[in-house]
Image (spheres, helix red, strand yellow):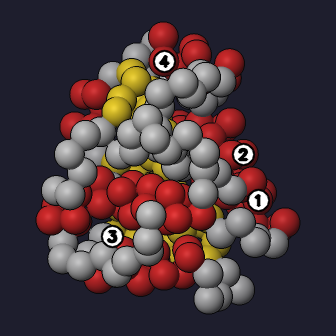
Amino acid sequence: MERRRVAGKPAEWLGRFTRVQAWGDISILSKPLLALFCSTACPGQVLLGAMDRARELRDMGRTVMGGFHSPVERECLTVLLRGLQPVVICPARGLDRMRVPGEWRKALEERRMLVLSPFGAGQRRVTAALATERNEFVLALADEAWFVHVAPGGETERLARLAREWGKKLIRVEAE
């Protein structure tokens, strides 16, 4: 998969996906969605603030979505899964032959989780290119975006610029 510039508005960009795979309650997409992003290269002191904010979002009942791939995103997911609010997880791969992690099962059974992928069976391994495309997919679906930390010059910085271009409401953008 080659990298390409994303043009147009989020709805136009989403139109290129002809098949989206889903596990869980698809009606979760009708709720206001907050996308969560954090650079993999993130100072340790950011983690505590992110976890506090994730607890607040959980307690407010906000629906948070993301790839939950970076260490900080994974920690936030752990906090969110302890709540009762919906969560949308978008892996950077197809769902065919993907095992459901044990920590997701309860939320799926309670119909408060949606696992959503724009990728088909041919994408079985996470790659940087798929993660980039997945993050753009998440951003396009979201109403708002929370950038926990943005490392200068990285993919998350490019994604934050794209969020601004698309007119997304930004909750917070913290850079080094």
3D distance between C-alphas at marks 2 and 4:
19 Å
3D distance between C-alphas at marks 1 and 3:
22 Å
SS of the residue under disc 4? helix
First in sequence: mark 2 vs mark 3: 2
Q: Disc 1 designates what residue? A: 47
Residue 137 visible: yes
Whether pointer 2 and pointer 3 mark residues with C-beta atoms closer than 8 Å, the reply is no
Whether pointer 3 and pointer 4 mark residues with C-beta atoms closer than 8 Å, the reply is no
Residue 10 left/right relative to 45: left
Q: Which mark is residue 119?
A: none
Q: Quadrant of the C terminus?
A: bottom right
Establish if 105 lies above or below 152. above
Residue 166 falls in image quadrant: bottom left
Q: Disc 3 designates what residue? A: 169
The residue depicted at 29 percent of the width and 53 percent of the height is 141
Q: Disc 4 designates what residue? A: 108
3D distance between C-alphas at marks 3 and 4:
28 Å
Q: Disc 2 designates what residue? A: 75
First in sequence: mark 2 vs mark 1: 1
> 156 or 170, which lies in front?
156
Whether pointer 2 and pointer 4 mark residues with C-beta atoms closer than 8 Å, the reply is no
First in sequence: mark 2 vs mark 4: 2
Residue 89 left/right relative to 151: left
Amino acid bearing label 3: Lys
Crowding around mark 2 (Cα neighbors within 10 Å: few <14, some 14 to 19, many 20+) is some
SS of the residue under disc 2? helix
Q: Quadrant of the N terminus?
A: bottom left
